[in-house]
Amino acid sequence: MHTTLSDASASGGSVSGEPLFEAKGIDYIPLAERRGRPLDLAWMWAGTLFNVEFVVYGALLIVGFGLRFWQALVVILIGNLSYLINGLGSLQGPRAGTAAFTINRAPFGPNGAKLIAIFNWITQVGYEVLGLYLVVSAGLALLSKAGVGSSVGLKWTLILSAACVQLTLPLLGHRMMLRGLRLLVPPFAVLFILLGIQALPKAHLGAGHNASWASMMAALAFVLSSGGYGWVMNANDFSRYLPERTRPRNIVSSVALGGFIPATLLLLLGAAVATAIPDASDPIAGLPHALWGWFIWPYLAFVIVQLFAINSVDLYSSGLTLQAIVPGIKRWQCVLLDTTIAAALTAVTVFSASFYSFLQDFVLFMLIWIAPWVAIYLTDFFMRRGRYDSGALMQTAGGLYHRRGGINWAGVVAQLVGMVAAASWLNAYPAWIAPLASHTGGSDFSVFMGALFGAGSYLLLSRRSVSAQAQAATPDTDEQWLEAYA
């Protein structure tokens, strides 16, 4: 199906050559329209992850999980190696020429993949709510400093305004996402440096008592989920425009470094600040206590822009995921619908008092489906050696991947087995401590067991069928694809 990979002709031109407004959604991207380089993905992920959310996550390792700084350091460095997984989860897009949850039809079948897509859509919308909540909180803090009092009407105004602004990049699409996020890297990096200069002298890195092994494992699960392992469902939505012959190792290294560097720096900053400021897990009311008085204004302004940036990635991908669930709906319609739902849920969250417990539980509980799904998705890719029939992936009735009733039961059963395994080793105290986690001193092995049982089951159940599919895949050239499936 594929020619020898090389850097020759690997680039079909700059991303700036794409249309300003992306009309395509989960449609196949013809080879003639593929553009960009792996380095574009590195800048995109860096622009996404140079974000105050990751300072919050780092602070939660100290405040929420009770780790000492050296323990948080170990957990952060090990957990952020998962950005290599995000890199591996970016290889399918250039091979298949479509988005993640269309490619997902290969291991699960068109109808079976819809169930997984629903889980992903809920997860993406949850993250959108998280970002919009923090944007509204930062807006309220800025207005409070300007002497404007808080009111129900003001909160609603901020929620609706934030939702409208949030539409911009995802509505315009791929080109503006990549270029806009890249432009945000330099100012965000400067902000990080200034935060470090102000906050680190106040840190007490040796403070506290050593947390238990179980707490460290739960914290590791949290870092994996909020980090590279939890971004795989977005990865191919951005890599699918790369030329098919782009070197895989360049894609993996670019995505991994673009994620690892900012995420590690910000998590470490958050953990360090939390050793001196117990409220550092609150980026609006707590973290500013570590800052110079005059700096709070630009800090809160930057926070708002940063949160819009990371939310754009989730909103863009949730729209593509919704298209995989409801074929025929336009990408821009999905963006509008998701924004409306996220705004409504944000209003519920703003007027409640349980946001931070919700955040910790949400990030951990979503591991139950993500842990096995990522492993199955990658296992399927390597079993078929990256050979996809792009036209068949577009079909929702019949075709190479349809199987019985549009469901690949091997994939669905493997997913369920993996989910049971992940749930059985999950420690999301106090909301849920799984039976097997209790019998291992509270240790959280949800990611590892979900991945092991999910991938292992899929490998055993699908070895022959996936190999046969790979051999039957139609060569991925524009002429043959259009002739067979246009």
Image (cartoon, rainbow, N blue to C red):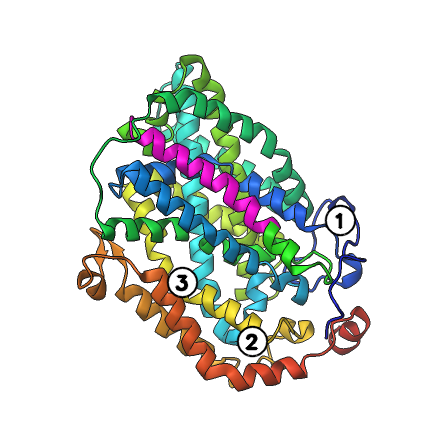
Name the quadrant of the C terminus. bottom right
Relative to the observer, which residue lies in front, 154 or 185?
185
Residue 104 at what x, y percent from top left? 54, 69
Marker disc for residue 444: none
Magenta segment, prevailing SS (helix, strand or loop) = helix
**Which residue is label 2 attached to?**
383
Residue type marked 3? Ala
**Which residue is label 3 attached to?**
371
Instruction: Reply above or below: 276 against 465.
Output: above
Residue type marked 1? Glu
Looking at the rendered structure, the secondary structure element under dot 3 is helix
In this view of the protein, can residue 238 be seen by the observer? yes
Residue 56 at what x, y percent from top left? 38, 37
Local packing at callout 1 (Cα closer than 10 Å; few below 14, some 14-19, many 20+) is: some
Residue type marked 2? Met
Relative to the observer, which residue lies in front, 321 or 193?
193
Sequence order check, earlier mark of 3 and 2? 3
Q: CA distance from mark 1 to mark 2?
A: 33 Å
Left or right of 10 in this view: 415: left
Mark 1 vs mark 3, foreground winner is: 3
Residue at figure coordinates x 24%, y 57% from the top left: 443
Sequence order check, earlier mark of 1 and 3? 1
Magenta segment includes 167:
no
The span picked out in magenta is: 254-276
Marker disc for residue 18: 1
Residue at figure coordinates x 67%, y 46% from the top left: 40
Looking at the rendered structure, the secondary structure element under dot 2 is helix
